[in-house]
Image: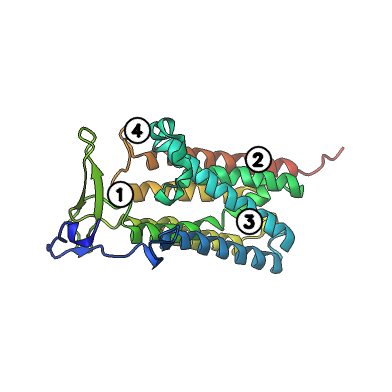
Amino acid sequence: MTLAQLPPAPDTGYHVHDFDPFLLRFPESWPIDGLRWYGLAYVAAFALAFGLLRLYYKRGRSPYNPEQQADLLFAVILGTLLGGRLGYFLLYRFDDIIQDPLLFLRVWEGGMASHGGMVGIVLGMAWFARKSKTSFWQVADIICTLGPPGVFFGRLANFINGELYGRPTDVPWAYHFLDYRVDPLTGYGEWFWTPPVHPSQLYQAGMEGLLLTIYLQARFWLSTPGRRPLGQLAGEFLIGYAILRILGEVFREPDASLIFGLSRGSFYSLFMIIAGVAIITLRRKAKQTNTLPDKVN
């Protein structure tokens, strides 16, 4: 569709989203359209994760040498991409993937789920822990500090793409986003401008990304590893992410049908809170059991 065929931008005094999702567009004869900000967000997230792993090792906060770091990062990347992609269809578009399984391969159409990506990362961590013969919980405490920066970059990319926007509002910083909808009865699609809505992607970038990054980095560097139970940081990450995700969902327009009156993001996050509380409780009990003094006869 050409720019001339798009509906005119609204003139309401609110911000109009006009960001280009492409950093660089390629000629039409090329097999791909161009270099997208969304793809660069993943590159930035993985590059930062690699840098942090090296820093942790140099400062004595991680036992994993450069060779092991490469294996760990590979497991995380593969788990993120496969888990995020599969989770998107299982959690949000299950009927569509059943009707057309090849949708999974059409990655250029987008579609990733953060909850699915986390499950994929857990499986990747389990593989690495077994390969390196180290504690799964030790791996988890390190990896959980690498995730929020990726969320930060991903949410900024969501904003640039003009996707996953918020609910209607009249706050001064509201945005109009250009979107596309298809009438389920006629199959006819059209472009439209949303009413003024919350730029919830930026809210989530600040909460799930930046705020959680600051908290976990502070906990990671300022706490003594031997004095906190292994798995403590992982449990705190699950609880913190879930709570902040639920808060963000208050401002975000649901992108799928509700479950028991909750957005799917909020509903799935409840299980993360339960898991986080269970991990912290069980790991503290395990540490207390392992550090009990010997009995005196």
Question: Quadrant location of the C terminus?
Answer: top right
Say whether residue 211 is visible. Answer: no
Closer to the eye: label 2 or 1 = 1
Write the residue at 25% across / 62% down: 17
From mark 2 to mark 1, how far is it between C-alphas? 38 Å
Please name the amino acid that badge 3 sits on: Leu
Please name the amino acid that badge 2 sits on: Lys
Q: Does label 2 or label 3 sit earlier along the sequence?
A: 3
Residue corresponding to mark 4? 259
Decide which of 253, 267 is in the foreground and name it: 253
From mark 2 to mark 4, how far is it between C-alphas? 34 Å
Residue corresponding to mark 3? 73
Q: Are marks 1 and 3 in contact (CB under 8 Å)?
A: no
Mark 2 crowd level (few <14, some 14–19, many ≥20, 10 Å Cα): few
Please, which residue is most extreme toward the right here? 297
Q: Does label 2 or label 1 sit earlier along the sequence?
A: 1
Decide which of 44, 101 is in the foreground and name it: 101
Say whether residue 81 is visible. Answer: yes
Write the residue at 29% across / 50% down: 251
Residue corresponding to mark 2? 285
Asked which quadrant contains residue 281, the reply is top right
Residue corresponding to mark 1? 252
Closer to the eye: label 2 or 3 = 3
Give the colour scheme of this rendering: rainbow
Secondary structure beneath dot 1 equals: loop
Q: Does label 3 or label 4 sit earlier along the sequence?
A: 3
Determine which of the numbered discs, if any, sits on residue 158 in the image: none
Please name the amino acid that badge 1 sits on: Arg
From mark 4 to mark 1, how far is it between C-alphas? 15 Å
Decide which of 142, 66 is in the foreground and name it: 66
